[in-house]
Every structure is written in structure tokens, then in C-alpha cells.
Image: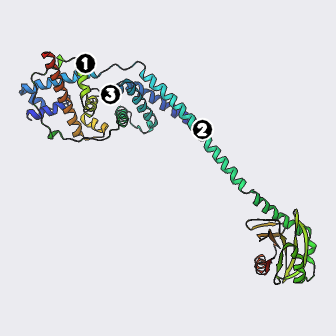
Amino acid sequence: MKVYNDMMDNKQLTFENLVHAYSAELYRFAFWQCKNKDLTEDLLQECFARAWKSLHTLKDEKAARAWLYTILRREIARHFGRNKTNDISLDDMNVDLPDAQYDCSVSDDINLRQALDKLPIDYREALMLQVLGGYSCEEIAEISATKAGTIMTRLFRARQKLRQLLTAENKSSVNF
Amino acid sequence: MNCIDVHRKLATEPNSRDDAINAHLQTCSACTKFAESIEQLDRSIHDAANITVPDGLAERILLKQSFKQQRQLRTNRFKFYAVAASVLLLFGLSLNLHYLPWQKNALSLGDIAINHVTQEMYHLTKNNNIQLAKLNHVLQPFNIKLNKPIGSIIYAGACPIQNSRGVHIVLRTKNETATLLVMPDENITRRISLTKDGFKATIVPAKNGSIAIITSLDSKADLEQRIENSLNQAIDYI
């Protein structure tokens, strides 16, 4: 019984550490997927509930962060009923050369947030994992259970789309 | 590496520049400008996406999780008690199966049959030779008759058995003696055997009630079966 209690205490401690360490960044990631504070918190709660249940499967503490992202991502996908992957090769896409007029500094956070809202969810997910999470394409592919090539495509398109949206916004502001 | 390759690489992973990209950027001002704009874009995305997290988020998560665990614990306890109750119920039922009314009756009937024989042991040593007609005369009130002899009958008489009446028959086959108890009011649904006090009783269902065949444990193993076969061939229900 003592062994069991010690094990439970250890599990509880690990769980609390995980919540304190990662709940904030996971909240930000989830928020940009569902854009609703209450829903974000519910999904995060569910993510940690699942993490609690399968905490025994987490063997390497270094993998905890990506593990939580994977759980949360699945939880979000389950909520929105999407599990399909859309594999497109980056080589199949046209790459436009830089827009010399584009200057991100003229855009404020509001414009950028609106532009982020307009991104397809798969693009935004990959972008947030990279920009907020600091993950590489391969790591994002692992978290998303998707091919690395597909993630590269999404990231490329996400930035391309953002640039287009922000450029259009800047031009309309100037015109206005 | 040309400009398109550099753009692809920068727009997918701006923070991982290898030597080839750095070499290209040193000689291409357009790509350098592109790299700077991408870096700036990422910084802006980071700042814009870095929304304020609600106060007490971690504490709320931990609190809700602890409530959930408590509920789970209660559910598990309930499940445990439910399983324990089911096991006890099954155990109780399995015990009761041995004491269902009919079986209880049959078991006690075995006792009664052997007790009846041991209390009237003197019938076993008689040397009478009762004829079939006289035997049928005893059996007639119970709507039974034998159409042929089943052995040498040394005793036949009506007896009180349990709370009603039956027929007590003692027969001798070669040097072995056996007792038959015809019990018209003792209904059973299947045969049952009981060994007690040096006797073995086998009670078989009959058209009316049941018939007990009681033999000594010293008898040949097939004696009961031989008597039962003879009885089945000879018995008529009137």
C-alpha cells in the first residue's frame, strides 16, 4: 500500500509540474486553433485529463512537451471532427519572389491576428507549433502525425498567405 | 542554390540556415531582404500570437483534475463494491443451488429411505416367500402392479413413509438382499444417490412419486442396476 501511495504521490507531482510548466503555451496553441477562451480551457482540461491517464507511458521527461502537444492536437482534432491530412509537396507549388513593398512593421498586432484568423487551420497549426513552440518541421510532423514535406508546404503557404493578407491590408489602409 | 530554393527554405524554416543559404545571402541582396522580412514577420507573429493566458489557469486545471480523480475514485469504489456484491451473490446462489426445494427433498428422502431400512432391519433376515399375487395385493392401493416376479420377495407391507404411506418390499436375489420403498407421494425430478450407515440408497422418479432401492454396501456393484432393470420391465401403473 505504501508503494502504491508513493507511486501516486510521484505521479501527482509529475503531473503538477507538467501543468505548471506547459499549460500557458499549450493554451496559446489551442486558442489559435479554436479561438474561443472557454473552449480552449475545456480542451486543455481534457488534454491534461488524458495525460494523467497515460502518464505511465511517458518514459522520457524530455519528450513530455511534444507529448502534450500531440495529445492536445488530437483533442482539438477530435473536437472539430477533423483527422484528414492533406499531403501536398512543396515542389508542386509556385514560389513567388519577394514583394519588395512588403514591410511587416507597418502592421500592428490586430491586423496580424486578423490575418492569422484567416489562415486555414492546418497552416495556422503548423505555424504556431513553429513560431510559438519552436519546433522544427520534422518535430511538427511527428506531433501532427503528418509527413515532413506536408508540414513544410503548410508553413510555406502560411507565411505566403500572411504576407499577401498583410500587404493587402497595408495597401487598403494607404488607399483609405 | 538559387533564389527559389533559398525562398523555399527561408519560408519554411527561417531559423535553420545552413552554410549554402548563408553563402547565397552574402551575394544576393533580394534574398537578404526577403530573409529579413521573414524574420520580422515571425517576430510579429510571435508577438501577436503570444496572447495573455487567463489568471490561475494551471490551478484551475489541477483543481478540476483532482475533482475528476475523486469522482473516478468513487466510481472505482462503486465498481469494486458492485463486483464484490456480485461475487457474494453468485456464491450465495451457488450454495442455494444445493438446497433448492426439490433437491433438499430428494436428499432428505435418501436419509429417510436408509433410516427406514436401518430401523426395520429385522425384515432383511426373514425367510418368507411372498407370491406375486400377494405382492400385487399390497401394491394395488397405490395403483401399481408387477406383471412378473422381480426376485424372491421375503417381505412386503404398507408402511408410513415421511408424512404419507408407501410400500416396503424386501427381496433376495441369490445371496443378496435389497429393499424397495415405493413412495407414491414423494415426487422427484431426477435420480439421486446417498450412501449412509453401510447402505446405499438410489431413488428414481416413478410415474407416481418415486421408488427407492436400498442395498448394502457389501452387495455387488451392479445389484441396484439389476433390480432397477427388472422393476422397469415388470412394473405396470394401473
**Residue named by callout 2:** B78
- Closer mark to the observer between disc 1 and disc 3: 1
Provide the chain ID for the residue under circle 1.
A
Q: Are marks 1 and 3 on the same chain?
A: yes
**Residue named by callout 1:** A110
How far is the residue under mark 2 from the one under mark 3?
A: 38 Å
Three-letter amino acid code at the position of disc 2: Phe
Q: Which mark is residue A29?
A: 3
What is the secondary structure assignment of the residue under circle 3? helix
Three-letter amino acid code at the position of disc 1: Ile
- Tally of marks: 3
Q: Where is residue B221 shown, x and y percent of the image?
A: 76, 76
Disc 3 crowd, CA 10 A, few/some/many (<14, 14-19, 20+):
many
Q: Residue at x 12, y 26 (%)?
A: B34
Three-letter amino acid code at the position of disc 3: Phe
Q: Nearer the viewer, residue B147 or A141?
A: B147
- Closer mark to the observer between disc 2 and disc 1: 1
Q: Residue at x 10, y 34 (%)?
A: B4
